[in-house]
Amino acid sequence: MINEKDVASYRENGYLVVENVLDAATLARMRQSIADLVAKAAGVKTHNEVYDLEPTHTPEHPRVRRIKTPHKVDPLFLEVVKQPGMISVLKALLGKDIRLHGSKLNVKAPKYGSPVEWHQDWAFYPHTNDDILAIGVMLDDVELENGPLLVMPGSHRINKVWDHHLDGRFCGAMDPTKTPELDYSKAVPCVGKAGSCSFHHVRLVHGSAQNTSEKPRQLLLYECTAADAWPLVNFKDLDEFNSRMICGEPTLEPRTEKVPIRMPFPPALAQGSIYENQTALRNRFFDIKAAAT
């Protein structure tokens, strides 16, 4: 689905948007699954192993901002990342042997979808090498007004892990007043029609503003790694680790490269998701407007 020029652009800029990766029928199935999952949040009072909830959530009026590890909740989401079009792009960017690191679904509903502060995925899960990326599956048309993924082109090549700590503890976000190398006015939005996908390097600086529009913005995220990239944190079970291979073969020989690493310890005081981690951040970049009731 992509050519050598696209691959070169990804290497240079750290991201790529590919149109028409998923067809209308697949999108319809995914939207229905998500609607069912959100409906089941009725009666849920607090974050749990499936849901991360908006601050305005009530059991009577469920507002979900994230469904955690959707590929474990509904097998449809594991099926999607293994589709031929998706695998074709992944092989061009990561090689023939690829593992799923994780998944999440950010649900930015109209008028109250929460922002995500600037960060690097690499700060959360350093590996032995950085042949790692995140896929953003656009389940709705993504436009400037409904809180698209914003990326800082080329920031992955600065070869740095910015500090994601506050008062000595991990908080999952960068203080925008302490990143003089970055001009956030040059951020690029990843927009596209439903069915398009963005692919961004694990060290690319990115974030997203609140959805203040009348349109939803649901973004399914997959984190994928080359099979020889081994995690430096949270490795527990070899069988489970290898069960996440989505193409090719696993290996017992990690490829180690000289990459910048800053460990995400001590862990954030607020656990559960990046939204909770980032509640500790004092200097926020993205405004949070009052949510519509």
Image (cartoon, rainbow, N blue to C red):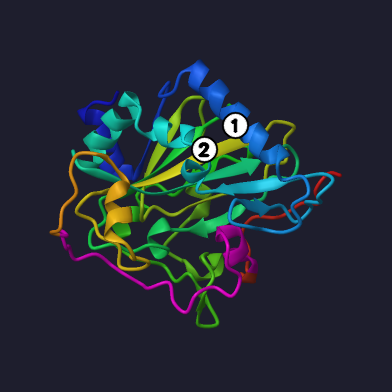
- Residue at horizontal 86%, vertical 44%? 293
Q: Crowding near pointer 1: few (<14 within 10 Å), some, many (20+)? A: some
Q: Position of residue 21 (x, y in %)?
A: 40, 24
Looking at the rendering, which quadrant does residue 230 occupy?
Answer: bottom left
From the image, give the main secondary structure of the stretch colored magenta: loop
Magenta segment, which residues? 254-279
Q: Is residue 51 above or below residue 233?
A: above
Q: Amino acid at mark 2?
A: Asp
Name the residue nearer the viewer: 14 or 32: 32
Q: Is residue 267 magenta?
A: yes
Residue that mark 2 sits on? 74
Looking at the rendering, which quadrant does residue 17 occupy?
Answer: top left
Looking at the rendering, which quadrant does residue 255 occupy?
Answer: bottom left
Residue that mark 1 sits on? 33
Q: Does residue 9 appear left or right of residue 205 in this picture? A: left
Q: Amino acid at mark 1?
A: Ser
Q: Position of residue 88 (x, y in %)?
A: 27, 29
Examine the rendering and report whether any part of residue 145 can be seen: no
Q: Is residue 2 magenta?
A: no
Q: Crowding near pointer 2: few (<14 within 10 Å), some, many (20+)? A: some
